Image: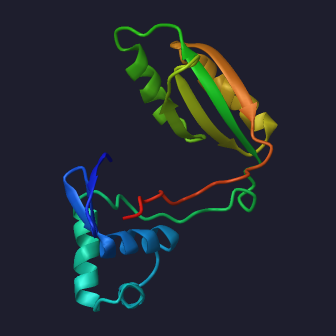
Amino acid sequence: MIICYFAKYSLVMANHILDKTDRQILDILQQNGRITNLQLSSEIGLSPAPTLERVKKLERLGIIKSYHAKLDMDELGLGIQTLMQISLLRHKNNAMQNFVDQVNAISEITECYHITGGSDYLLKIIVKDMRAYERLVMDKLSNIEEIGQMQTMMVLSVVKQSDTLPLPII
């Protein structure tokens, strides 16, 4: 979202005015999406009905997109996480869309970013082990005709991973 201007108690973002209470709601929900409306209303100092109306408004506006459970990779036996830079062979006709369509069909690719620089895309890949990674590369990625080059970076450890967006201070 593009921040247009700051006012004393509100923030205008892409045609939506967010006041201090909306920001509090967003901060709290980013930390705990399972909080009850009663708990949320208590934390922001409003009664439950107006709190629920504000949350519904934020959902309707598309500011709150969804709620998710964060899963533990290790507990699920997913031991390999990689980042892969992809360069396409060609950038014409439907090559980019064909690549994107095929990437979206591969569940082990959990994120895909169209980027600038020496590569065209950055993929985040999560698999069980090296054998599963090799099968993914050999059986799925190598069959995508649009890919010219792949460069893999193995994630050794995650130093920081935030599930919250930094909301500008008003």
Q: Is residue 105 at least partly visible in the picture?
A: no
Residue at image position (74%, 37%) is: 132
Q: In x, y percent, where is residue 86?
A: 59, 21
Q: Residue at x 34, y 9 (%)?
A: 93
Residue lying at the far front of the rendered structure: 8
Quarter of the figure with residue 148: top right
Position of residue 50 measured from the top left corner of the image (x, y, whole percent): 23, 84
- Compared with 39, 166 (above or below) is above
User: Quadrant of the rendered structure where residue 27 is?
Assistant: bottom left
> Where, quadrant-wise, is the C terminus in this rendering?
bottom left
Q: Is residue 110 left or right of residue 15?
A: right
Q: Residue at x 50, y 27 (%)?
A: 115
**How far across and down, in percent of the image, does residue 95 sit?**
41, 14
Q: Is residue 124 left or right of residue 134?
A: left
Q: In the picture, residue 23 is in which quadrant?
A: bottom left
Identify whether 152 is placed above or below 147: below
